[in-house]
Amino acid sequence: MAEIRLEKLTKEFKETLAVDHIDLVVEEGQFFSLLGPSGCGKTTTLRMIGGFEDPSSGAIYLGGDDVTDLPAYKRNVNTVFQSYALFPHLDVYNNVAYGLKRKKVDQADIKKRVEDMLVLVDLEGYGPRRINQMSGGQQQRVALARALVNRPAVLLLDEPLGALDLKLRNQMQLELKRIQREVGITFIYVTHDQEEAMRMSDRIAVMNAGRFEQVGAAQDVYKLPATAFVAGFLGASNLLDGEVEGADGSSAKVALAAGSTIALPAARLPNERGSVRIGVRPEKIFIEAAGSSGGGTENRGDNAIEAMVDISIYTGVSTSYECSTTDGSKVVVYVQNMGASADALAPGSKVRLSWHPEHTFAVEKNSSTEGGDNEMSDRGGTT
Amino acid sequence: MATQVETKPTAPPAPGPHKERRKKRAWILPTYTGVIIAYLFIPILVMIMFGFNEPAGRYNFQWEGFTTKWYNPDRLLEFEDLNEAVKNSLLIGVISTFVSTVFGSLIALALTRHRFRGRAGLNLGLFLPMASPEVVLGVALLALFVSLNVNTGFVTIVISHVMFCISYVVVTVKARTSGFDRSLEDAAKDLGADPWTTFWTVTFPLIFPGILAASLLAFALSVDDYVITSFNAGGTVTIPLWVYGASRIGVPPQVNVMGTLLFGIGVIYVLVSIFRGRRQGAVPSPPVKAG
Ligand SMILES: Nc1ncnc2c1ncn2[C@@H]1O[C@H](COP(=O)(O)OP(=O)(O)O)[C@@H](O)[C@H]1O
Ligand SMILES: [Mg+2]
């Protein structure tokens, strides 16, 4: 049974439509991420599920029960807050025990469960410590323990790693994933960091301006973005204008404005006729000097276009090329630096770019604006 | 630090005048602090000292010899009307502290977390008793009581004390509530605490140091007040009124002893509140602004 179901959930603040009629089903035991740029409504969605914000309209179901009008303290969900919100007047033990005490669990049980939980989050023996004697990473674990000890049906996490430095963050991502597997509780994880979401989640909902652009398995969302926004927000992507020429069984042909006709699985086309935008990830493109017939042919794809190198940037493990096609579109290509072959393509060289039809995706021509462009995607603000 | 510099061979050996000057300057702050402390404490020391004096005549202004006899309950409580005044002052102090602390704390909470009609007016109104001269307040209150045909006395003193104490309570408690991180209350609710439990297990313990400090201030203001009380006391006598009356014919050492005892209670109260505050620690600011 679905652990969480949202039906046309909407939240309007005075001026802003923060969450706009979203529908969502999250299955039991999943690690589910809400991914989107700052201000897209992730926190508001989470706060409605937690019971801290009343929806303007719509309904929330937890394990089949309508909890839309249930106050926060009666919902079987717990939250790890963005700022942790640990009680500064209580020690670590009493912070973690707080929820169990409210449920009138007996003293011996509380002690056992709190201590087990501190072991789980790697804080054994820290019980008597005061909160202000704990580092950021440790506070994060206390917040996690304080929520998990109640064995909620669903755990809500609002950018829980946002305040940590990069190294600690990577470490905690693995840790969180391990803990989630161990306890088997459904996690709803809010983040604006696409790499974090991809690394940890079973499924991802990509959110933009209060709506879901796409909901799907982490891999699918990356491989087959449904909209230009998703393609741009999850890593770098190249989008090329084209016209659908028609389908031939399971394969469809699209004539690119850049001058060639390419193929892709027909099911990926958003519309059967007319204009579309064709996408391909930079690491899926094979680049070679125009007219060359040298090695690496096994990497060549059946889809190909002519282009010219504008800039090449050597970054050690890889080289990235920025090319422009005959119609002026930009295409970015990443090449792994594996041998001596990656030296010939100076700016100005004419090149042939090719990729496989199965690495090709398509989005609507006039779908919403693109998400943050490749590496420049929004990783700064946390609001 | 200086020695470290000297042991480093490459560092320029300039310990002379520089070090001297720093040494000289190092005296300024402690001396200044000492002077201020003396300035604050000498009157209190004099009060305590003259509680141990054995005055020759009626006036307890000159040191004549050491005695502890005024601390003997029989001697201490020898003036019936002084005892009455002390009893009145303590009772009025406790009642007006309790009332003003409860209401003032609630007002402070309301002002920091709710937007409501009249909020700006209340904010301003609360400053008026602090800003206006006490004499004026005293006269105005008397005029009010007279025009309402209320007999002045114990009750009117309490009413007037609550009025001016409440402003100080609000200002003091507000300092604590305005920095309060509301996500802590969300966290409590999240963990299953209803609003009542949330208040008593999270909100109250965290603003308690502010409430304690406010109540101390209110009590001190109430016990201490002469001007407003004098207008609204009717036949009721408090310590300041009695002392003022007695000062014309000579203040007995018992007054010093009573003062010393009250001061002692205050010191204990302050120490307790500092100790509690320290144990509790300042509320640490959250690592990220919740959003
Ligand atoms: N309490 C509030 N009052 C008014 N507007 C709000 C409030 N909370 C959030 N918003 C607005 O709703 C939108 C979504 O905010 P939020 O859910 O916090 O986004 P995210 O967590 O994705 O960064 C933003 O435009 C924000 O300004
Ligand atoms: Mg947010």
Image: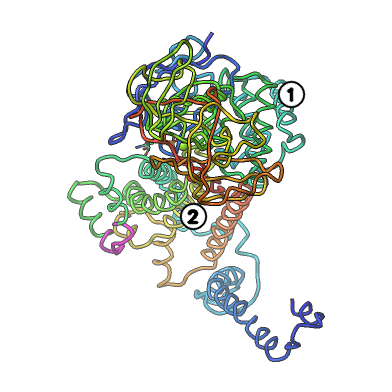
Circle 1 is placed at which residue position? A112
Quarter holding residue A23: top left
Mark 1: few/some/many CA within 10 Å (<14, 14-19, 20+) = few
Question: Which residue shows up at 50% across the image and 26% down it?
Answer: A360
Q: Comparing marks 2 and 1, which lies closer to the viewer?
A: 1
Q: Find the magenta span and give its range.
A: B128-137
Q: Position of residue B123 (x, y in %)?
A: 30, 50
Chain of residue at mark 2:
B
Q: Amino acid at mark 2?
A: Asn
Q: Amino acid at mark 1?
A: Lys
Asked if marks 2 and 1 touch (Cβ < 8 Å), the reply is no
Spot the residue most to the left.
B147
Task: Let me know if marks 2 and 1 both belong to one chain.
Answer: no
Kindly state the secondary structure of the residue where label 2 is placed: helix
Question: Which residue shows up at 71% across the image and 43% down it?
Answer: A339
Please determine whether, in this image, residue A251 is positioned above or below residue A160: above
Question: Which residue shows up at 46% across the image and 57% down it?
Answer: B220
Question: Which residue shows up at 43% across the image and 48% down it?
Answer: B178
